[in-house]
């Protein structure tokens, strides 16, 4: 009863302020090598968003987003195979990890929170973690997370994103895999940072309860039995097939978020929308901004949002959030200026 009273009080205070805690942008590129939803990998596809690698200036983008837009979180997706150089269960590859860590350290240097996100859809080369007859095991996932958590155990602003968009799997079995990862992260010394728990159906906000993700992941705990800083991870796109592949938005997703907010509030839990987005189009200015407005009025249960995506994406990408740079000046995409940053600064 006391905890619910505190939650209710927090809800009133947060609604009064009408602003989420965290807002930012995905800085993509290290995930391009695992670009399909089967967790397949091509090393030639990786496009590190780093000027030091002759690619996009992800560090410059993040500095701009913090300095000029006031954003305060970035998600840094990366292929599992890239981290261990294709060796399942292997150690972090020194060269590859050092390059990825440049992005993480650049993010931390801005003062923002930084989500380390393994972008493999709960798979390694088509095999589902913990559901592939022993081919890819919970221990394999726990191993890479132990190593990553040990690297960042002292960094309070690193957030651990266990897995991007699991799908087409048994959710209760997947919850066991997530529990293994949580235990591994905590046992590596990262005892207080946030950990994001992703559900099935591409961790979609609209089906998080109905497909069983909320109930199954709700049982995941820290080693001490608490659920402190175990945050549900959700995604939502607003185009006609909810895939984020069109520059046009046909819905605002507010009903989905409001329904999930009711469940979260009733169960004393919180969620973080780590992928959403749309094109710099009139329909998305209307619908995406409405989506984010709804989150700003449910800040007791929603930590914030992260738009998809900047980094190595070209500005011509359908839902690009990559700013342009000319004569020392960064210029945002319209969807960032109006919604992703606009609704955070409002």
Image (spheres, grey):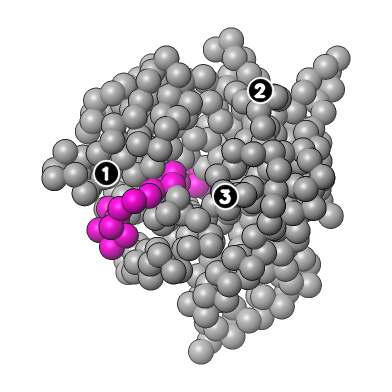
Q: Is residue 76 visible?
A: yes
Tell which circle, 1 or 3, labels the residue nearer the N-terminal end. Answer: 1
Q: Is residue 288 above or below residue 321?
A: below
Disc nearest the viewer among 3 and 2: 3
Residue 314: mark in rendering: 2
Q: Position of residue 211 (x, y in %)?
A: 40, 65
Give the labeled residue for mark 3: 242
| Tag 1 and tag 3, C-beta contact below 8 Å | no
Instruction: Report the side of 164 relative to 280 (left or right).
Output: left
Tell which circle, 3 or 2, labels the residue nearer the N-terminal end. Answer: 3
Residue at 26 percent of width and 45 percent of height: 129
Point out the stretch of residues depicted in magenta: 154-177
Q: How far separated are the C-alphas under marks 1 and 3?
A: 23 Å
Tell which circle, 2 or 1, labels the residue nearer the N-terminal end. Answer: 1
Instruction: Report the side of 41 relative to 203 (left or right).
Output: left
Which residue is situated farthest in the left direction here?
A: 133
Magenta residue check for 157: yes
Which residue is situated farthest in the front direction here?
A: 240
Q: Tell which of 25 and 4 is nearer to you.
A: 25
Q: How far separated are the C-alphas under marks 2 and 1?
A: 31 Å
Give the labeled residue for mark 1: 128
Magenta residue check for 123: no
Quarter holding the C terminus is: bottom right
Q: Position of residue 338 (x, y in %)?
A: 82, 45
Find numbered disc 3 in the image and state the secondary structure of the residue it sits on. loop
Find numbered disc 2 in the image and state the secondary structure of the residue it sits on. loop
Q: Is residue 134 above or below residue 82?
A: below
Disc nearest the viewer among 1 and 3: 3
Residue 143 picture quarter = top left
Q: Position of residue 231 (x, y in %)?
A: 48, 60
């Amino acid at each position: 009863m006391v905890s619910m009273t505190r939650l209710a009080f927090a809800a009133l205070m947060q609604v009064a302020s009408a602003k989420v805690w965290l807002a930012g942008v995905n800085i993509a590129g290290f995930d391009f090598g695992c670009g399909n939803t089967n967790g397949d990998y091509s090393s030639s596809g990786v496009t590190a968003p780093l000027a030091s690698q002759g690619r996009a200036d992800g560090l410059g983008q993040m500095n701009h987003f913090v300095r000029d837009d006031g954003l305060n979180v970035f998600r840094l997706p990366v292929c599992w195979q890239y981290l261990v150089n294709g060796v399942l269960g292997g150690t972090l590859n020194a060269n590859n990890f050092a390059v990825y860590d440049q992005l993480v350290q650049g993010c931390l240097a801005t003062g923002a929170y930084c989500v380390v996100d393994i972008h493999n859809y709960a798979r390694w080369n088509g095999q589902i973690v913990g559901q592939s007859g022993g081919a890819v095991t919970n221990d394999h996932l726990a191993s890479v997370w132990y190593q990553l958590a040990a690297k960042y155990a002292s960094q309070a602003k690193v957030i651990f994103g266990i897995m991007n968009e699991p799908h087409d799997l048994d959710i209760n079995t997947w919850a066991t895999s997530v529990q293994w990862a949580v235990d591994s992260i905590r046992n590596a010394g990262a005892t207080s940072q946030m950990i994001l728990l992703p559900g099935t159906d591409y961790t979609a906000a609209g089906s998080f309860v109905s497909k069983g993700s909320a109930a199954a992941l709700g049982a995941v705990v820290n080693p001490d039995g608490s659920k402190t800083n175990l945050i549900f991870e959700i995604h939502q796109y607003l185009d006609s097939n909810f895939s984020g592949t069109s520059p046009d938005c046909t819905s605002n997703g507010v009903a989905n978020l409001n329904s999930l907010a009711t469940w979260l509030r009733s169960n004393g839990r919180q969620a973080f929308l780590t992928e959403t987005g749309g094109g710099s189009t009139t329909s998305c200015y209307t619908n995406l901004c409405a989506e984010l407005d709804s989150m700003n009025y449910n800040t007791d249960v929603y930590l914030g949002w992260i738009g998809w995506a900047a980094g190595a994406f070209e500005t011509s990408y359908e839902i690009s959030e990559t700013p342009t740079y000319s004569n020392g000046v960064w210029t945002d995409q319209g969807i960032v200026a109006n919604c992703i940053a606009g609704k955070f600064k409002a």
